[in-house]
Image (cartoon, rainbow, N blue to C red):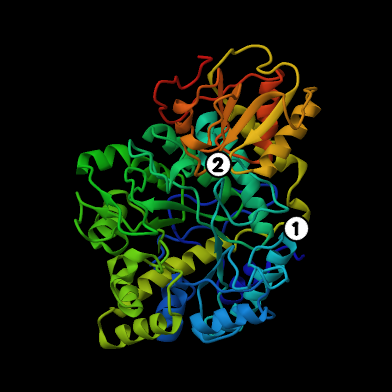
Amino acid sequence: MPALSRFAALVLLVASAVSAGCGHAAPRSTASTPAAPPPATSAGTPGQDSPAARAAALADEDLVGQVLMPYAYGSSATEVSPASAAGNRKMAGVSTPAEMVARYRLGGLILVGFSADDPTSGTQPTTNVDSPGQVRALTAGLQQAAARLPAKVPLLVGTDQEFGVVTRIKDGVTALPSAMAFGAAGQPALTEAAWRAAGTELAALGITVDFAPDADVLGDSRSTVIGSRSFGSDPRSAAEQVAAAVRGLQGAGVAATLKHFPGHGHTSGDSHEGLPVLRQSRAELDRADLPPFAAGIDAGAWLVMSGHLDTRSVDPGVPASFSHKVLTDVLRGQLGFTGVVVTDAMNMPPAKRWSPGEAAVRAINAGNDLLLMPPDLPAVYDGLLAAVRDGQLPRARLVEAVTRILTLKQRLAGFRQPPMSEVDTAAHREAAAAAARAATTLLRGACRGPLVTGTVTVTAAKGRDQARAWLAAALRKAGVAVADAHGQEVHLVGYGDAARDLAPSAAVTVAMDTPYLLSRAKSPVLLATYSSSRPSMEALAAVLAGKASARGRSPVPVAGLPRSACS
């Protein structure tokens, strides 16, 4: 690889080394990343090569394309399966991801983990995220397609790599614990180190935007759609964790995204199914939901994702993702955010109250800069273009949005693309393991000595064969005898499990997701790992075998149980 990534080289063909204030802080220079270009006075400062000047000079077709970030089917930019080609044609009228970039002059593309292929066909379904090598080849092909566009600016390539239950790239990369596990560890330095490792690996694969970290604070509703994606229920502690994750990701050259603004943790509704309602007062919103977003912005986050949420105290009945009051008055005015605002997926129900084209226009006019996963791409593209030309969408508003996007792309150009040898390294795995060890929490039982004796049998709700196998292997390595049956039972529960999934006879019950279910468990020993990753299972084995102490504290309250039985 050359000293600069293809992404950076493309930018430098069309822009000087000017960087403007997207967010509040530039990425810090490291041994593996050159210093970011010196900042200009503002993203809107006129100048021959400023983002504002370049945005204003773009044709309307290019401006519209820059604010779009759809998904596409297929594991390659140019060669896809027949089913992927059919899926792309249905959605966008073209067969391949590269053709989608070209047809709509796209500013970005999100990589997803679902497939258009028939899983019963006898052939392995292909996705955007099958393996590290495949992802790197896909992103390189996408950037080649972007280089041929009239705008001559690279693509933003994003994905949802939150870790835990929302993880798109699962194989061949370092697996971090969930956000809630970092909250239980309570050590921002560990969080920053682990997320820097993750960011380095994403950058190596050609991913420039991570739709993480989740800045939602969990409330009494125990929002299941957020759950362990949250760092916890305390706004101040969550804020420290969010800021650390932002510093880690962006220090590695990957843009962090705070989501779901203004906060999805205090509602039991799911915006994938309807429009959740936030009923807090304005003062409660400021106190309980906004601190992690404010901390992430202060840490320099380059994107914020607007949530499909009815924020009754600010703009009742209007989804926050379409609310000028929420996005412009609160996010930009009160919190001072100057970076890119991206919508949550535009194919979700709250965005479908309007036609695709009208929803797109409304979202941009409300203050979003980037539209994620718009449905019916031709209708969205044509709708935006028509709105610019007839004045429904002021061209100045579109130029403003694209200026922020180009500013972000210039920032990202200050980082080299790491080689593939920096993916899943021993140092990165240790960063994840350190966080998992610090997160493991004992909520009932003795704090010293082995928690299991004699032969152990590992069971789990709904199979969970991978986690069971990892734990069994780690226990054996720690010197514990493990048998398939009739041993002292260690029972694992995880995401989506309920009281019926508990094992009444288990000597130990372990929560691998949120710990709330432990309040219903009768086992004499209760533990939480908040994650079913391999590092979490290895950390759990060490505690069970008495070779390590459980140092974590539950970052959410569990009825009838302490935050830690060891405090």
Q: Tell me where residue 429 appears, x and y as whole percent.
A: 71, 41
Marked residue nearer the N-terminal end (1 or 2): 2
Q: Tell me where residue 220 appears, x and y as whole percent.
A: 33, 35
Q: What residue type is disc 2 on?
A: Ser
| Distance in Å between CA atoms under marks 1 and 2 | 26 Å
Identify residue for label 1: 419
From the viewer's side, name the closer residue of 81 and 385: 81
From the viewer's side, name the closer residue of 544 and 318: 544
Image quarter where the N terminus lies is: bottom right
Q: Residue at x 80, y 22 (%)?
A: 479
Q: Is residue 455 above or below residue 229?
A: above
Q: What residue type is disc 1 on?
A: Pro
From the viewer's side, name the closer residue of 540 and 143: 540
From the viewer's side, name the closer residue of 332 and 270: 270
Q: Residue at x 67, y 78 (%)?
A: 80
Identify residue for label 2: 178
